[in-house]
Amino acid sequence: MRKIALLFLLTAVLFKAQTFAQNIVSNGPLKVSDNKRFLVHENGKPFYWLGDTAWELFHRLNREEAEKYLKNRAEKGFTVIQAVALAELDGIRDPNPYGEVPLENNDPTKPREAYFKHVDYIIDRAAELGLYVALLPTWGDKLAKEGWGEGPEIFNAENAKTYGKWIGNRYKDRKNIIWVLMGDRNPRNEADVNVWRAMATGIEEGVGGPDKALMTAHPQPNGMADGGSGKWFHQDSWFDFNMFQTGHCRENPVYDRIQVAYNRTPIKPTIDGEPIYEDHPVCFNSKELGLSSAYDCRIAAYLDVFAGAFGNTYGCHDVWQMYAPGRKSINGASIPWYDAINLPAAGQMQYLRKLIESRPMLDRVPDQSLVTQSGEIYDRIQATRGKDYAFVYSVKGKAFTVNLGKIAGANLTAFWYDPRTGKSKEAGTFANKGQQAFTPPTSGYGQDWVLVLDDASKKYAKL
């Protein structure tokens, strides 16, 4: 019986991976939705971005290790892997596991075929597993190391365009590529802005036109109050969606940051591309603040998405750098990446994706008028809704009151959704008018809950 159960489990996992892979083949590459708030497949099917920051994937893992990592992420429901071609951790001079460096004499106009064949392999394997790759052509320290980062500083506007055209042309036929510029660096001045614009122009030329490259930029946390990377590029035609980094502190009002970008014109989708990581020194101060937890990751994810983001990114401090015994540890990483890929939040992120995909995705909007109170961070109540459903997230299981009548339906069904387990508890049926108080099943630190309200006539799944 045990062998039969194991065989059934392996078959289910394989079927899931094949289904995800089929999505890329049958639904095509990604584009911005008609309402400019979300990403969709080429055929119009909604896409949920569940990203993982694997910045050092191409640089530090061999093919067998990359296989282990990618399979784990596909099985956990991730849809996007965020990785860097010219990586942060001395990625130009320190060879990959096969002894290859990416550039000849650190010259971005002379990429080395042997190194990029390994990148090719990982990108193609990701596609086979149904994973998109948010590809950073370079980490930002190759333009400006500014106090940290190995560099060296090798880019100017001319060679950035050349390199952009080369790498765009190399991956123009891959359907699972999303382009991400900047790499954890804000432009210092207009000259830096022009370098990134030149690289974007090169990529567009390389892939065969602006309509064939879905592109954004990954900034530093300072400047996030100004609308993420849109602070510099929102009006640029190549810039398709806004990306933030809200960093690794607990007290960030991520919902306010999302709202700034959400309200910009012209309308463009927005996402937090680097929120607080699991197992990260909080504010880089583990001695006084400890390490971040799965709860910290859930808070950032649900607040981001309910505030208007079209998906969420997860990250783990030990995984982004692919830490392993014998490697230099960055900021106190201590768990080998092959163990850290199974930390709790990595498995819990799929429940948010499951929730959002369970209802019509493309008419969802943030709407704090659903609730009578909002609060701040650990007392936060964050609300979002579609035409005939609503989700309300209570960070600490705090009771709240809902203003009914905001969605369609004479009567509403309600249930509580547990972000820790993806399971639900019935919460009753109500007339869709007036106000209604709700008290989550549990409360306190780590006891976050989502209230789901549905137009009863729709008979949506209870999850």
Image (cartoon, rainbow, N blue to C red):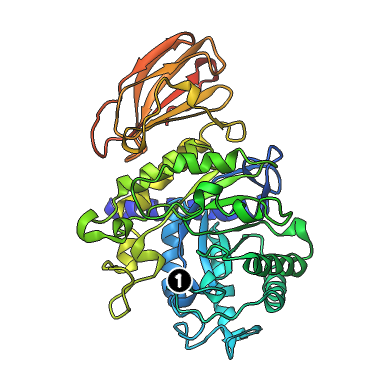
Write the residue at 30% across / 55% down: 282
The amino acid on which the numbered mark 1 sits, given as a three-letter code, is Glu
Q: Nearer the viewer, residue 418 or 230?
A: 230
Quarter of the C terminus within the rendering = top left
Q: Residue furthest front?
A: 189
Write the residue at 59% across / 79% down: 116
Which residue has dot 1 on it? 56
Residue 204 visible, this angle: yes
Left or right relative to 294: residue 80: right
Left or right relative to 148: residue 121: right
Image coordinates of residue 398 in percent, x first then y, are 30, 27
Image coordinates of residue 236 in percent, x first then y, are 71, 54
Picture layout, residue 372 above or below residue 149: above
Left or right relative to 439: residue 59: right
Which SS class for mark 1?
Answer: loop
Residue 15 visible, this angle: no
Image coordinates of residue 317 in percent, x first then y, are 35, 62
Residue 279 sits in quarter: bottom left
Q: Nearer the viewer, residue 410 or 182?
A: 182
Q: Residue furthest left?
A: 287
Picture layout, residue 114 above or below residue 190: below
Picture layout, residue 185 above or below residue 235: below
Write the residue at 36% across / 48% down: 297
Picture layout, residue 40 above or below residue 176: above
Write the residue at 69% across / 37% down: 35
